[in-house]
Amino acid sequence: MIYWLYPYLQEYWQPFHAFHYIGLRSGCAFAVAMVLTILLGKPLIQRLKAVGVGEDAGFSDDPEVGRAYAASGKSGTPTMGGIFWMSAILATIVLFCRLDEPLVLIGAVLMVGMGTIGFVDDWMKFKREGGRNGLSRRAKMLCSLLLAALVVATYWALGDSLTGYPAIRNLYFPVLKDLFAQPDTLGVWGFLIFVSFQTFVILATSHAVNVTDGLDGLAAGSAIPSLVALALASYVVGHAEFSQYLNLPHIPGSGEVTVMVAAVLGATFGFLWFNSYPAEVFFGDSGSLPLGAAIAYFAIVSKQELALPLLAGVFVIEVSTSLLQIYYYKCTGGKRLFPKAPIHHVWQLRGMPESKIVARFWIVAAVCASLGLLLLKLR
């Protein structure tokens, strides 16, 4: 909105012209999203407590983990914090993003869609007796799959109809500067491969963040380094000179997505204000699903989807240990590969203070994101 207003505002005060620049709008988006999240968070948390939207901390598929959560005193802590987190992001996007940029609109649709799926799941858990049964896994996966596939198919279409830049449809390999895949050359099969792969990236990342959201501040704090790295990557890819210097594709509109990344980053800092130990509110599926989907989408737009396992290293570690544990258990007839999964439960059950576990995961997240950024230069 402010992008369209600044030509009129600068007639009264010339410095308003600076809102033409992505850097200034990104900084404002970060600050406004963080402040909005904090302002919206306090009354909503009180409201959630009043209506009894609380976490059943003693419930878990693993009895030991359930007892550890129950002993931590988390029972009754409100969930569904993704509501005010998402509200702050959407308001900030409307204020500072160019709403005529398709890449911004597609990202907003993805986040709202994933947030709606998560909200329905959280709401069903709240309304049903015991607060344990939300959407079935099949229903949640089907809805997420259809949404992600639709978003990726629309993104593919931009490579021809609106921007005319075929780089949108390519897959770029980290480090190997002259090697990239061109699914577009395979016709319909290339389209199907591209949509299938990028849909998998979105679903895998959203599920990974959902799995990681198990300790106070773990998911939100681990997402921050990834978002910082992806903000820089999207800005570089959207800048003609920087992208050429780093031998990266130039995608018009990617720079505008940087403003959106800044809004998500600011809102995540604001959410961490309440979610850090001891947590006053939890993300719930209404927050963790859209956060993961947003991280994946920003990586796709900035052509860093193949570097995402490193950029979002903590989430990959968490979901990998969970999946490996499940399949190893099934294949060996009941044996465990890890003492507990996802991996943060190992130290939780050993009695390590929760704040120390989370802080160490944040450090790992920062290191992984930094190494992921180095791949941009290595190209």
Image: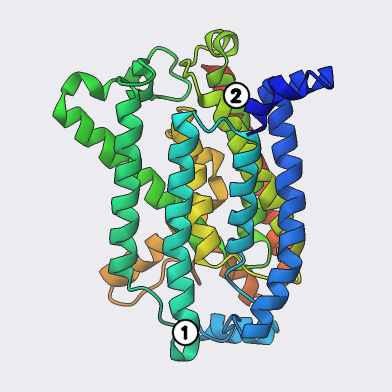
Instruction: Note whether residue 248 is visible.
Output: yes
Which picture quadrant has residue 311? top right
For image coordinates 61% across by 81% down, the residue present is 54
Say which residue label 2 marks.
Answer: 235
Which of 129/106 is in front? Answer: 106
* Image position of 133 (left or right of 246): left
Up the image or down, 207 lies above or below 78; here it is above
Quadrant where the N terminus is found in the figure: top right
Q: Residue furthest bottom?
A: 129
For image coordinates 48% across by 67% down, the residue present is 119
**Residue 372, horizontal then vertical, whole percent:** 57, 32
Say which residue label 1 marks.
Answer: 127
Up the image or down, 303 lies above or below 313; here it is above
**Residue 34, horizontal then vertical, whole percent:** 74, 49
Q: Amino acid at mark 2?
A: Tyr
Instruction: Note whether residue 75 is visible.
Output: no
**Residue 375, horizontal then vertical, whole percent:** 55, 25
**Residue 158, horizontal then vertical, whole percent:** 35, 25
Which picture quadrant has residue 79? bottom right
* Image position of 174 (left or right of 283): left
Which of 42/314 is in front? Answer: 42
Q: Amino acid at mark 1?
A: Lys
Which picture quadrant has residue 73? bottom right
Q: Viewer-nearest of labels 2 and 1?
A: 1
Identify the element where label 2 is drawn.
Answer: helix
Is the Cβ of the residue at disc 2 closer than 8 Å to that at disc 1?
no
Identify the element where label 1 is drawn.
Answer: helix
